[in-house]
Image (cartoon, rainbow, N blue to C red):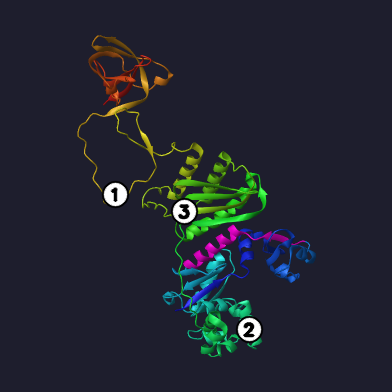
Amino acid sequence: MRLACLTVPMFPLAARLRSEPDLAGTAAAVFAGNGHAARLVAATRPARTAGLCPGMTLPQARAVLPKLVARGRDEAGERAASEALLDAAERISPRVEDGGEGVVYIDLDGLHRHFPDEKELGRALIAAAKREGLSARCGIAGSKLAAHVAASLPDSPVVVPAGGEAPFLAPLPLARLAPEVDLAGTLTRWGLATVGDFAKLPASEIAGRLGEAGRALHDVARGLDPRPFLPRRPPPGFTEGMSLEWPLVTLEPFLGMAEAALERLVRRLRDHASGCVRLDVELSLDPDGQDARSLSLPAPTRDVRTLLSLVRLNLESKPPGAPVSGFSFTAHPDAPRPGQLTLFGPAEISPDRLATALAKLFALLGEGRVGSPRAVDGHRPERFALVPWAPPPAPPERRPPREGRGLLAVRVLRPPLPLEVLVEENGPVSLRTLVSEKTKGTPDLSGAVRVASGPWHLEEGWWTGEGVARDYWDVELSAGPLCRIFRDTASGDWFADGVYD
């Protein structure tokens, strides 16, 4: 089995620089802890050149470099950077293992068909990590430990030949194996300085003198790594976020940082050929508390401006109520809708752009006010329901158009045409159109009635005895068309809402 290890040196600093790339050329450092007891974890090259080293307290670092830019460890940013590193590795191999902070193991089985040699494969892994804003090193070997040690060397990528794990580890100091403190002290008293010196000891004596931990360390020194490869399962969503140095009270500074996080999120979605169909927003509030909300989209999208507009509108309609000290965005992926191409005529609207427009309408108009109209089980012409919009599927084959069957067609009048109706015992006997500015261009329905049929109760539920809002009549004029009229039972006014052609 051949494995690659992709590791990011000074991972807490790399995760912070990924969220704040402007700090890359400055003297900046990441500290763990609070107040003056905070200890330096990692620093940029200008800060290290000035004399800063891990373990310094914040006052000590300030004494050496007064203009130092200090940042705390960013849990949300480090978690997002770890997921981004795993995504980068998954673009090369489908089997990857999360090795902890800034460490990923990759199964190289079958990848020799796509790369000329393992050196080129290592360069591809480093380039994939760089696309995510992470400077990584790569090592390739037959065991996880040998690959991890190879990845820690400066001339990356480092390839350990198959079966050469033990000779590769032999000249390295024992500290590379990270032994336990008590075990390291015992090996030092024995006068062992390198991994090869420890590997030469007889295996039968190690367990009796150093216990199970010593036996496992001796196996590793001989190039035998008993740890199995455990591939991770793909996550249900993609997460990006960061902890803020200062709590934010106003919306605009927050949106500036949120836009950078959404751009990284959309780039990861694009690499997986997916779009965001639901965006979960989690806000950390100062001094304590959480605010979680979910934004559903009508269709998958990869438009950063749309996602940012939805976040803005949601926060403006429902403010968090406290300063924001951190945030995270989780995008639930789904396959974007395909667009229909055509050889003739203008191209159809992009599904991404259509989803963007629908998402903005949903945010502006609210739930239940945007959708696709559908007929409901009722007789009244105005009755309809809104259902979530979805493009109709393409027909499997070209179908010939239906032939007409000579049926009457109803030309619907919207708004209804006001009428003056003379009614006798058997129903309407004459109609007259009420002329106004609104009725210009509408058909003239004035004249005597030759035949009138009705009243028809087109509203469902009339049989319950609750009454109806309209009485409908089908009327044929002596010198005119056949039309449909109704009387509003509440006001007594008459209207025409359709003409039969």
Disc 3 or 1, which lies upstream in sequence?
3
Viewer-side residue, 185 vs 129 = 185
Label 3, label 1: how far apart the Cα atoms are: 30 Å
Write down the region rendered in magenta.
Answer: 67-90
Residue in the image at 60% along x and 59% along y? 75
Label 1, label 2: how far apart the Cα atoms are: 77 Å
Q: Which residue is mark 3?
A: 332
> Residue 81 lies in magenta, yes or no?
yes
- Residue 480 is left or right of residue 27, and the answer is left
Figure quadrant of residue 490: top left
Vertical arrangement, residue 408 with respect to residue 476, above or below: below
Q: Quadrant of the C terminus?
A: top left
Under mark 3, the amino acid is His
Circle 1 or circle 2, nearest the eye: 2
Give how far across and how far down residue 108 sits, in percent. 45, 75
Q: Which residue is mark 1?
A: 395
Number of marks: 3
Circle 3 or circle 1, nearest the eye: 3
Instruction: Name the disc covering residue 336, or none.
Output: none
Q: Main secondary structure of the magenta part?
A: helix
Under mark 2, the amino acid is Thr
Circle 3 or circle 2, nearest the eye: 2
Badge 2 marks a residue whose secondary structure is: helix
Label 3, label 2: how far apart the Cα atoms are: 52 Å
Give how far across and how far down residue 399 sits, in percent. 24, 47
Q: Which residue is mark 2?
A: 186
Under mark 1, the amino acid is Pro
Dot 3, crowdedness within 10 Å: few (<14), some or many (≥20)? many
